[in-house]
Image (cartoon, rainbow, N blue to C red):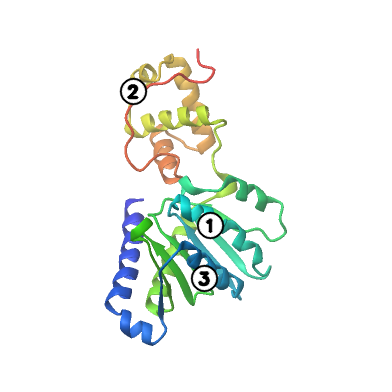
Amino acid sequence: MDELEEALLGVSALIESTVAINRDRYSADRLVTTLTGPYRRVLDTAERMIAGARRSIDIVHARRLQEEDRAERAERGLLGRTDPSVQVRLLCSPELIDEGFVSEQVDLPDPVDIRVARVPPLQAILVDRESALVVTGVAANRRAAVIWVPEVIHTLQILFDNVWRGALPAADRIVFGDRARAAFARQILAALRAGVTDEVAARDLAISVRTYRRYVAEIMTLLGANSRFQAGVRAAELGLLPLTRPGSGSGAAPGSG
């Protein structure tokens, strides 16, 4: 995923440099409109773009909002105004997936197609492969613009499509149970990725080696992995492990013995 992250960061840099270097020319041609002021202006613009879509809406939701931004309006509500004939794809980072929204889509006749992948902190809406609303940065450093620059839109769309193909459908994600059990499973996955021996991992987790191996077998089955190393790699690809390599903390397993 490192190459993917670098590519996404590169696109973000491309957007910012394109807007900064050519702001006057693009603004004169109405190819870039910078959005300043409160976050509601961003949401108002997103609402208009979504409502005006004719064929497709592709969304990247990987930028954590500030408290005051979240209080403005629920972004998920904006998608309720789309025409049923418009294809909607939503790409989320694992940390920002909205479980309630995913559940709501399951039984709808025209559900939003939601997938999960690791992406840098970025918000973007691409409409009809012709325009994009892009938001980067946080708080006072937030930068937002509506872009119609063809080369930027083309680059964003290609990258979105490439990430989308390798992303995991939200409804198919691995579910490990309650929060405590999920946290414990991530500790085991981190140990598998790091190649820690069963004895060391079991000691760090304060469980028996037999119990540890039982958990490993269950997790490998859930991940469809043929080896422990593959399970660790697969978990990282699916966003089940943090980007930074975790320490070997300790903790009691639910139902261990």
Q: What element carries label 1?
A: helix
Crowding near the residue tagged with mark 1, few <14, some 14–19, many ≥20 C-alpha atoms within 10 Å: few
Residue indicated by mark 2: 197
**Is residue 138 among what the camera can see?**
no
Place residue 33 in its image quadrant. bottom left
- Residue at (41% x, 59% y) in the render: 122
- Residue at (36% x, 19% y) in the render: 204
Residue 129 screen position, x and y as percent: 50, 74
Residue indicated by mark 3: 45
Choose between 84 and 64: the one closer to the eye: 64
Q: Are marks 1 and 3 in contact (CB under 8 Å)?
A: no
Q: Is mark 3 on a helix, strand or loop?
A: helix
Estimate the spatial distance between the alpha carbons at disc 1 and disc 3, rounded to whole Å. Answer: 14 Å
Amino acid under disc 2: Thr
Place residue 242 in its image quadrant. top left
Amino acid under disc 1: Glu
Residue 153 screen position, x and y as percent: 42, 74
Residue indicated by mark 1: 72
Crowding near the residue tagged with mark 2, few <14, some 14–19, many ≥20 C-alpha atoms within 10 Å: few
Indicate whether 254 appears above or below 120: above
Choose between 147 and 35: the one closer to the eye: 35
